[in-house]
Image (cartoon, rainbow, N blue to C red):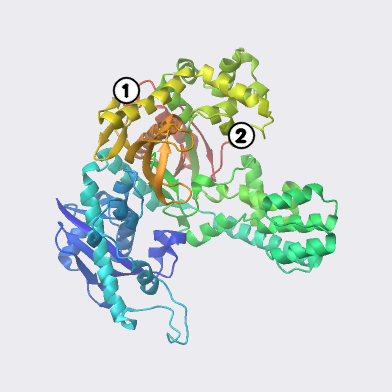
Amino acid sequence: MHTLNIDLESYSPVDLKKTGVYPYAEHPDFEILLFGYSLDGGPRAVIDLAQGESIPPALVEAIFDEGFLKTAFNANFEITCLSRHFGRPLPPEQWQCTSVLALTLGLPGNLAQVAEVCKLPMDKRKMGIGYSLIRYFCLPCKPTKVNGGRTRNFPAHDLGRWQLFKDYCAQDVTTEMAIREKLLRWAPSAEEQNLWFLDQKINRRGWLIDSDLVDAAIAVDATLKARATAEFMALTGISKATQVARLKTWLYEEHDVETDSLDKESVKAILKVTDNDAVERALQLRQELSRSSVSKYAAMTRSQCADGRIRGLFQFYGANRTGRWAGRIVQAHNLPKSELVQEDLALARGLVKDQDLDSLALLYGDIPSLLSQLIRSAFVAPKGKLFAVVDFSAIEARVLAWSAREGWRMEVFCGHGKIYEASAAEMFKVPIESIGKKSPLRQKGKIAELALGYHGGVGALITMGALKMGLHIEELQPLVDAWREANPNILSFGRQMEIDAKRCLRDHLPHGNDRYVFRYESGMLFMDLPSGRSLCYVKPRIEKSEITGYMNVTYDGQDPITKQWSRTSTYAGKLLENHTQAVARDCLAVAMTRLDAAGFTIVGHVHDEVILEVPEDIAEAELRRAEAIFAQPILWAPGLPLTGDGFTSPFYRKDA
């Protein structure tokens, strides 16, 4: 099969980073400027479309020919842009994504970073000048006297810089080819490649948005902020609540309240002790005005396509340590929770659309909080359809029990499935029948299950909200001890994972069992999963911790907070977490593949749930059919008890 490597440079007035590629390419002013390519590893070439050159007919034919494998770094961009350019969709089944190849190996998703991590020769790395060239030619510019009031820079405005841009495009082709050549030996399996095809299909399909609700929510928020700003100014004489220095001066000179900061915690502290109504109200207004309850609504508005759908919401292999998907644009994986049942959500949605602030305040009190709770419901099913929302019941807990062969937990999941009650019964040696839904023991069982599965301790309980749930600090260590005593196999399974990982790094031989195998290859540590997929740890070593003195497994990876490539360490609990979440992800992948093969229309998936569009008149029957697919055994996970639970709704929500 022939291989055609492609890299594009393009123009659109739409902000690509804020909207994603679909609205970017849909804009009438979108155009491809440069088409860089290499055929079968041959010389690089750049076609200057911006200056009148055209893609040769033979190359156009190759782009649509299934006999040519097309490759690109972040291929979704090239597929979408070329589909728009030619006016017909390109099938992703003819493509491979070099970015995905890097992500599956635990490498960054950024071309320049991957080249650096792979230690490519300097002549095969990206040109550092690219950012300024893209800003000049690919984005609108501000009209000035110097540039004659134009809003866009064309090649003729700086031919020297344009030639440099063409060189930059050609160099990107070189870099992408070098990365692919270096990493191709670890290419994803056929199953993973097919899963990427399904991912592209889902992202291209999109998820419909209720524009009326979104617009009304933004309008309601603007009205509330205008009212609050007017009240704040009348009270303090300050025009904006963001003017911190002036507000601190007002607090001190007018009310003898001195503070070094007006951050969230400082304001809380002042509100606890003040008995001054003016101070209290001013700070409350500042808190209200600083809340961003409609930022996701704004993201929906700017990223919506002409047909009302948002596309590109899901990043394949977005969590490159486990391979789970990540959210993009609106971040559907991180939507605010709502305590409202479907009927109340429907009523609140109607009142927001009517912009009935008086009724909203009367019925729900805190309107900004309500707007946040309604964000999820802005995703709606089209006319004549409903959503069938189906998820795996306690998937991580089931995978953990199955992997570690924790017998009593497996019995629970093969039976009634009440893991919180069963955990409490096992921990405190009481009959499960004595633990009701509101029992304090159930609460302890729940928080223990949420916090301690990956070898967590007291700190994990506190992080998960144990103290806020009413537990006392002196109860936490006994709770940890009780959970660990009740789950010895889980503890030993995680510890054995760390032992096997270290053994593998010492002797470079495979170590593990039928649930995982660690193997060392070409300076990388792989954790082979039951599905046949592997997790990868780059440049692993065993190093002594300067803080604890413990011999840790360390590797190169991307810091989840700073996003910088750095040295990090792992341990038994973290390896166990990686394994469990990766296996759970693979279970979801199987379910999604089966749903698609069964003819279901998948529009979204968040963590362990899938959102389907189903015909309204047979919605309940389709829900039952989808739940049955979730519960089907998985060949590579014999004995893993799976259950699918779901509901139908005209808009996206969490189950009541």
Q: Is residue 459 left or right of residue 541?
A: right
The residue singled out by tag 2 in the image is 462
Q: Amino acid at mark 2?
A: Ile
Q: Is residue 572 above or below residue 233?
A: above
Q: Position of residue 638 (x, y in %)?
A: 35, 22
Q: Amino acid at mark 1?
A: Asn
Q: Residues within 10 Å of mark 1 (few under 14, many from 20)?
A: few
Q: Secondary structure at mark 1?
A: loop
Real-space Cα separation, disc 2 to disc 1, in angstroms? 34 Å
Q: Nearer the viewer, residue 542 or 315?
A: 542
Occupied quadrant, residue 89:
bottom left
Q: Residue at 52% x, 30% y: name it.
A: 456
Q: Is residue 416 visible?
A: no
Q: Is residue 9 above or below residue 407?
A: below
Image quarter (top left, top right, bottom left or bottom right) of the C terminus: top right
Could you tell me if the residues under marks 2 and 1 are in contact, i.e. CB atoms within 8 Å? no
Q: Position of residue 574 (x, y in %)?
A: 44, 33
Q: Is residue 442 visible?
A: yes
Q: Residue at 29% x, 26% y: name it.
A: 511
Q: Is residue 352 left or right of residue 383?
A: right
Q: Is residue 177 left or right of residue 206?
A: left
Q: Secondary structure at mark 2?
A: helix
Q: Which mark is residue 513?
A: 1
Q: Residue at 71% x, 52% y: name it.
A: 266
Q: Position of residue 268 (x, y in %)?
A: 73, 49
Q: Is residue 177 above or below residue 55?
A: above
Q: Earlier in the sequence, mark 2 or mark 1?
A: 2
Q: Position of residue 374 (x, y in %)?
A: 61, 49
Q: Residue at 30% x, 59% y: name it.
A: 78
Q: Residues within 10 Å of mark 2 (few under 14, many from 20)?
A: some
